[in-house]
Amino acid sequence: MRLEDAYAACARLARSHYENFPVASRLLPARMRPHVAAVYAYARLADDIADEGDVDAARRHARLDEWTRRLHAAVAGTTFDAGTSTLDAATRDLAPAVFTATAHTIRSIDLPIDLFDDLVSAFRQDITVKSYDSWSSLLDYCRRSANPVGRLVLRIGGWRSTELDAASDAVCTALQLTNFWQDLAIDWHRGRLYVPAEERQRAGASLDALDRGELTDQWREALSQSSARTRELFNRGRAVCDGVTGRLRYELRATWLGGLRVLDRLDASGFDVFHARPSLGMRDVPALAWGTVWWRR
């Protein structure tokens, strides 16, 4: 596959999915956009493999094994026999583009491949782990499911700094947690719950209420405390938006503002996501654009 066609396919995939933040948008310098789209495409499809609920766990694990092996083979320049692929037809069709682009990105920018492996390890965990007992276990999941993407974006932009990595980790974890609270109803119907047991037990929140689609006062308290923790992470991570220069700072500002805007809406709605799922739309663009340009420290 031609390299430009591979990157174009990754860009189309990035545009086709809703996120609470921009992905490889025109806020980024043109040189960064193809690489960020490749990283997103690799992570998005791996996440989709883990979430194939109608496919048995063993097959999903096998597909993630293949996903990792194919990336390592592509980076090393060795061949993979696609005739033995375990992937479904749609993912198998996209795979050549994703691995061609992602391998080129890794080699040309010298990205650490272990960050890609961390992503897959978290998605693999989704297959078997349906809830979390503690904040520490949930944050460890976020460390692998979200934080690698932020670090990869920084490195694509040419930034390698312990301080920026730490701030980026805080923002990425906050974005992941916001998505969990936003998707509480969806995840519960799929058999998953990301509010840590220690938090809901502290509030006295009953799982039976979720079965009824009811956000009780106890659940609102648990989610309010969870939201407060998430907001602290956003505040801690804001430094990464001020710590980079050039156009990357605008992408990071828009990312930070978009995630916080969704969290604000969750707070304002009392977290009643069984009746309405807050999300971003075209009407949010002017406010986000204004905040991105007229950023205040």
Image (tube, rainbow, N blue to C red):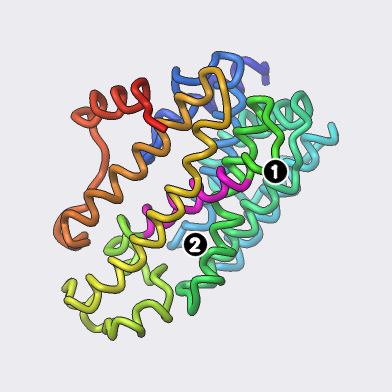
Instruction: Look at the numbered disc 2 and give the secondary structure of its residue.
Output: loop
| Residue stretch rendered in magenta on the structure | 166-180
Q: Please state which of the two labelled residues, at mark 2 or mark 1, is closer to the viewer.
A: 1
Q: Is residue 265 left or right of residue 259?
A: left
Nearer the observer, 124 or 284: 284
* Mark number displayed over residue 162: 1
Residue 11: where, in percent of width, then height?
A: 50, 25
Q: Which residue is mark 2?
A: 55
Q: Is residue 186 magenta?
A: no
Under mark 1, the amino acid is: Thr
Q: Is residue 175 magenta?
A: yes
Residue 180: where, in percent of width, then height?
A: 38, 59
Q: Is residue 255 left or right of residue 30?
A: left
Of the two numbered discs 2 and 1 on the same chain, state the one appearing first in sequence: 2
Q: Is residue 100 left or right of residue 46?
A: right
Nearer the observer, 236 or 53: 236
Majority SS type along the magenta span: helix
Instruction: Look at the numbered disc 1 and give the secondary structure of its residue.
Output: helix
Residue 34: where, in percent of width, then height?
A: 58, 22
Under mark 2, the amino acid is: Val
